[in-house]
Image: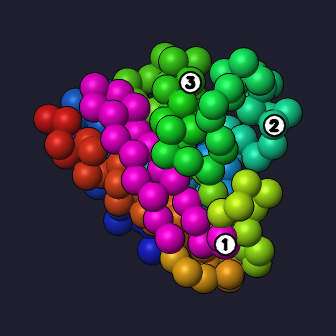
Amino acid sequence: MESLAPLAEKIAALLIARNETIAVAESSTGGLIAAALLAVPGASAYFIGGAVVYTKQSRAALLGIGDADMKGLRPSTEAYALLGARRVRDAMKATWGLGETGATGPSGNRYGDAAGHSCIAVAGPLERAVTLETGSADRAANMQAFAKRALEFLADVLAAGR
């Protein structure tokens, strides 16, 4: 988690300076994104909350995403990550929402994505999504790589949103 600290500090500074907030819905990172953001002293000024949305059951319970919302939409896509980002932002009344979904490994997910696949989205005054493919089947390394890319991406979107 140490490698995530400089990114989280940059994000915290941007959000605090603009009096903005963030909420996180992550899946394959297992809480690493939220943990990095919360590790920065003063996180209560910008971090509203987060959820690890790992299953269909948690998707419905935590984000209110039901079967009707998933018509024509497949998990582990940029569109699904964006839906998660929007839902967590709206549910927590944050300025920004971050959604992450993917396949950490050692095998791919049930939707046909290979291990090392992650989709990350940010929803707020700007909306953007990106896909990361590490090409690795190392579960722990992928979790770290996904969290790092999510924080990098969030910092880039926040900087563009000025």
Residue 78: tell me if it is visible. yes
| Identity of the residue furthest to the right in this view | 57
Q: Residues within 10 Å of mark 3 (few under 14, many from 20)?
A: many
Amino acid on which disc 3 is placed: Arg
Q: Work out whether 130 lies above or below 87.
A: below
Residue picked out by circle 1 = 115
Q: Nearer the viewer, residue 110 or 51?
A: 110
Q: Which of the colour schemes (rainbow, by chain, secondary structure, one colour) is used?
A: rainbow
How far apart are the alpha carbons under marks 3 and 2?
15 Å
Q: Nearer the viewer, mark 3 or mark 1?
A: 1
Whole-percent x and y of residue 154? 36, 48
How far apart are the alpha carbons under marks 2 and 1?
19 Å
Mark 2 and mark 3 in contact (Cβ < 8 Å)?
no
Callout 2: helix, strand or loop?
helix
* Left/right of residue 50 with respect to residue 161 in the rendered view: right
Residue picked out by circle 3 = 87
Looking at the rendering, the stretch of residues picked out in magenta corresponds to 114-133
Q: Nearer the viewer, residue 140 or 43?
A: 140
Instruction: Give the tally of numbered discs.
Output: 3
Whole-percent x and y of residue 162? 14, 35
* Left/right of residue 162 with respect to residue 27 in the rendered view: left
Callout 1: helix, strand or loop?
loop
Whole-percent x and y of residue 148? 46, 65
Whole-percent x and y of residue 5? 42, 65
Disc assigned to residue 11: none
Callout 3: helix, strand or loop?
helix
Q: Report the residue at 66% width, 44% height from top.
A: 75
Mark 1 and mark 2 in contact (Cβ < 8 Å)?
no
Residue picked out by circle 2 = 56
Q: Report the residue at 79% width, 57% height from top.
A: 110
Instruction: Residue 21: name its quadrant.
Output: top left
Q: Nearer the viewer, mark 3 or mark 2?
A: 2
